[in-house]
Amino acid sequence: MISRMFKGVALLGALLALEGYAEECNGVALYSNGGDNGQMIETGRTFPEKPEWWANWGNFDGMDAPYIRLSGMNNVQGDWKGLLSFRSLPLRVDGGKLRLKVRASQNVKFGIWLKGTSESGVYYVSLGANKTHLLDVPLASLGVTGSFYVENVGVGLFQVPKYQYMTLFIDDIEFTCVGKSPREVSSSSSFSSSSDVWKNADEGPWEYEFSNVDAWSEKREARLLPDVETEFSAAYSEQERGTLISRTNSDFLVSELEHMKIVNSVRAVEMTAKKSRMTWYDNLYSVLRNRLRENVVANPKQLYFEAEAVAAQSDYTVIPLLVADLDYAYGACADSACNSTYIVDSHLLTAGFPTSFVRGSKMSLVLDPYFVVTKRRELPSVSVCFSGLCKSVSFKERLEVEFPSTGTQKIVVKMKSGGQSIEQNLFLEVK
């Protein structure tokens, strides 16, 4: 089952990894670029709506999508509070600062605090409407001196007016000084798998357990995450869907601009590793958000976060390849002013990674039907190319890639489905 490919030098990556964790006091990012999907503790939650962990309402001044979004409205004035949990938690902080970006749709009083075996004080700040605030909160301002064991980060909006829809955006949350290295923190994290997917480190190398799911099924059970993710919000109302369904047999209808963005992203020759990481998710967001029918294919948000969980659980050495093989349509302008449109059938055939980096010089790439979004009964053929060498990979197979150096590396994924084929460049940073 296991294919070996691409030999290089691992010593440099190992030395850099050791050097990176040599300091006693490490900075740890809890949430950055949407990379650490968390959860809100339901007990005591008074925010009207659950968080959206990969929100994209556009790029704001000083805050780029994706970010956490907390929203809602109540019929009484009051405080909205909630405890956030992230995969890096729990951890021990030793002084330093808590940094984050926050933004609110209305003027409001914001508060943040830490919860562990005890609860810290609350740090308050007044947020101006539609303005990004970069908060640099010394832990001493929370009443924390010396070591403090953090299990959750509390956030709140205070004295929110009644009948006023309020939105809070949060991004780039980090501690500047923790008492354990990120690797040690990961091994003691409270986040755990509900199934025995992984072997313990002392039992041998990380092992991946392939699923038996049919890729064309719209059903996906949560494997590593505690809950199944909600669907993307729908762009069309029921009335609009009825009108559009009469014009096309497609399940998805996007704008011509969105279609062009999808095509350009799949054909891109160069991009940053962070941008490359978001391409698969963004393209599926564009297509499935513009759905005309419900429950057509598996929820790509769920698959993306599950793939991210696999990467995190393996310390970013086992990376699932995300695949989409999906028909859609777009509305093309029929005149220069685009007063009328006609429907054009198209197809999305694309691959992606759930992370922008890998740890060390070796990566185990897995191809699992679980991480495929499609309606087709025949899965696409996949080949992976690196440093001029190509290797065909079958589903339920893993491919071991060995990088010759650290830094950004390009991996070419070639896919064929029916009469269509793509050659897509994906980028990863080797740390």
Image: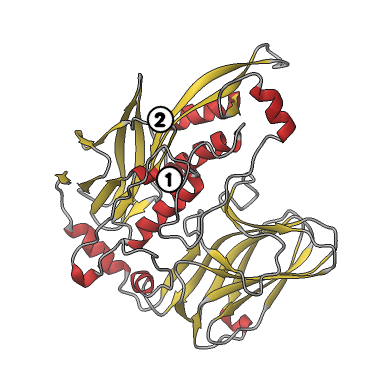
Question: Tag on residue 181?
Answer: none
Q: Nearer the viewer, mark 2 or mark 1?
A: 2
Q: Earlier in the sequence, mark 2 or mark 1?
A: 1
Going by the image, does 76 lie left or right of 402?
right
| Colouring chosen for the image of the structure | secondary structure
Q: Is residue 80 above or below residue 94?
A: above
- Left or right, residue 92 beside residue 7: right
Q: In percent of the image, x 40 and y 68: which residue is there?
A: 192
Residue position marked by numbered label 1 in the rendering = 277
Q: CA distance from mark 2 to mark 1?
A: 25 Å
Which x, y percent locates residue 13?
A: 23, 58
Q: Are marks 2 and 1 in contact (CB under 8 Å)?
A: no
Q: Residue at x 15, y 49 (%)?
A: 8
Vertical relation: 400 (above or below) 75: above
Q: Give the tally of numbered discs.
A: 2
Tell me the tag on residue 376: 2
Relative side of 24 to 402, left or right: right
Amino acid at the residue labelled 1 = Arg
Q: Nearer the viewer, residue 423 or 136?
A: 423
Q: Nearer the viewer, residue 390 or 178?
A: 390
Q: Quadrant of residue 40?
A: bottom right
Nearer the observer, 332 or 329: 329
Residue 284 drawn above or below residue 124: above
Rendered location of residue 335, percent (x, y):
68, 11
| Secondary structure category for the residue under label 1 | helix
Residue at 45 percent across and 40 percent down: it is 280
Residue 318 lies in what quarter of the image?
bottom left
What type is the residue that disc 2 sits on?
Answer: Arg
Location of residue 258 in the rendering, given as x and y in whole percent from the top left corner: 57, 30
Residue 229 appears at what percent x and percent y? Answer: 53, 53
- Quadrant of the image for the C terminus? bottom left
